[in-house]
Image (cartoon, helix red, strand yellow):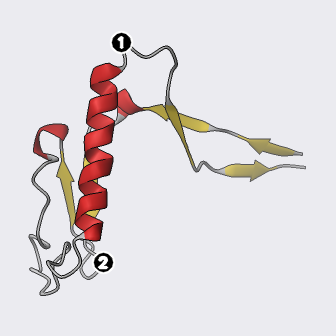
Amino acid sequence: MTVENKMLIELSDVIAVEYMCKKCDTRLVMTPERWGHLPSNCPHCNEIENWFPRQDTSIREMTLTLLSAISRLNEAKERMTFSLRLEVKSATTKSG
């Protein structure tokens, strides 16, 4: 038998975003008030290659678009005639 638990989150459950440096694993957590100010590089190791390189603005633009959409949808939720939730990966347990 396989038991599967689904984990769904409402956009209002998103209280912060976390950036993690792939070089040193330092994590930077930002609340919605700061989402418009993307970190340029790791605050710990100051990784020379910026997190959002100037020569490739698409990652920066997509990140800002995602964070802005979450904020705007949260603001509009009272006017929405549906509930929007995101399903995230959860553990699957096998027994017997």
Q: Residue at x 28, y 57 (%)?
A: 63
Mark 2 or mark 1, earlier in chain: 2
Is 88 positioned to the left or the right of 79 in the image? right
Whole-percent x and y of residue 50?
A: 15, 79
- Residue 2 position (above or below residue 73): below
Secondary element under disc 1, as helix, strand or loop, is loop
**Residue 16, quarter of the rendered image:** top left
Q: How dense is the environment of label 2, judged by Cα within 10 Å: few (below 14), some, or many (20 and up)?
A: few
Instruction: Judge from the rendering whether residue 54 lies leftward or rightward of residue 88; answer left or right.
Output: left
Residue at 90% across, 49% down: 96
Vertically, is 70 above or below 81?
Answer: below
The mark tally for this picture is 2
What amino acid is found at the position of numbered circle 2 in the picture? Lys
Looking at this view, is 28 or 3 the one in front? 28
Q: Residue at x 9, y 53 (%)?
A: 37
Relative height, residue 44 to residue 69 (above, below): below
The residue labelled by disc 2 is 22
* Label 2 vs label 1, nearer the camera: 1
Q: Which mark is residue 13?
A: none
Task: Please tell me which residue lies in front, 63 or 58.
Answer: 58
The image quadrant that residue 61 belongs to is bottom left
Mark 2 falls on what kind of element? loop
How busy is the neighbourhood of tag 1: few (under 14 within 10 Å), some, or many (20 plus)? few
Q: Residue at x 49, y 28 (%)?
A: 84
Which quadrant, please, contains the N terminus? top right
Q: Is the residue 13 above or below the residue 36 in the image?
A: above
- In the image, farthest residue toward the bottom: 48
The mark found on residue 78 in the picture is: 1
> What residue type is disc 1 on?
Glu
Foreground pick, 92 / 88: 88
Residue 39: percent from left, percent from top: 12, 63
Residue 58 rendering spot, x and y as whole percentages: 28, 69
